[in-house]
Image (cartoon, rainbow, N blue to C red):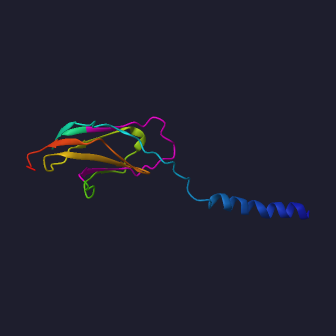
Amino acid sequence: MRFATTISSLVPLALAAIAFAGPTPLDVFSPPITFPTAGTVLVSKTQTTIAWNATGAPVNISNKALLMLRKGDLTAPFILAEGFDLRTGSLDITVPNVLADTDYEFVLFGDSGNFSPTFTIQSDVPA
C-alpha cells in the first residue's frame, strides 16, 4: 500500500516536470544565399526572388526569419521582410529604391546571420 501511494504521488510531479521543461530548443540553421550571386545587377522598384539553400533544414528552426539589406558597413534599418519560414528556400521582394551603388548585400537572419555575395542596385536615386 505504501508503494502504491508513493508511485501515485510521483506521477503528478513527473507530469509537471515534463510540462515545465520549456520550449523545444531550436537548431542553428544558417543557409547559404544562392541568389543574388556576386556581380548580380538588381533594379530598384522591381520584383526579385532571394534564394537560399534550405536542403537539410532542421524541423525546429526559427520561424522568425528576417531579411535585411546591407550597404557597405551599414545593415540597419533596411528590413525587407520578417517572420517568414527559412525552410521555404526563397522569398519574393521588391528591390528597395535606394542609392545606386555596387556594394549591397542581403543578410538572412534566422538563428544566425548569413550574407549574400556583393551585388549592384541600379536606381533613379543617384549615388
| Nearer-the-camera pick, 24 or 54 | 54
Relative image position of residue 70 (x, y in whole percent) = 26, 51
Tell whether 36 sits left or right of 28. Answer: left
Relative image position of residue 44 (x, y in whole percent) = 15, 43
Relative to 80, say whether 22 is above or below. Answer: below
Relative image position of residue 53 (x, y in whole percent) = 40, 36
State which region is magenta.
49-72
| Nearer-the-camera pick, 23 or 114 | 114
Tell whether 14 sits left or right of 19. Answer: right
Q: How many marks?
A: 0
Does 114 lie within the magenta span? Answer: no
Residue at left 79%, top 64%?
Answer: 9
Q: Looking at the rendering, which quadrant does residue 1 occupy?
A: bottom right
Residue at left 19%, top 48%?
Answer: 96
Residue at left 82%, top 60%?
Answer: 7
Tell whether 27 sits left or right of 51. Answer: right
In the displayed orientation, state which residue is furthest to the right.
1
| Nearer-the-camera pick, 126 or 65 | 126
Relative to 103, say whether 10 is above or below. Answer: below
Does 69 lie within the magenta span? Answer: yes
Tell whether 55 sits left or right of 107. Answer: right
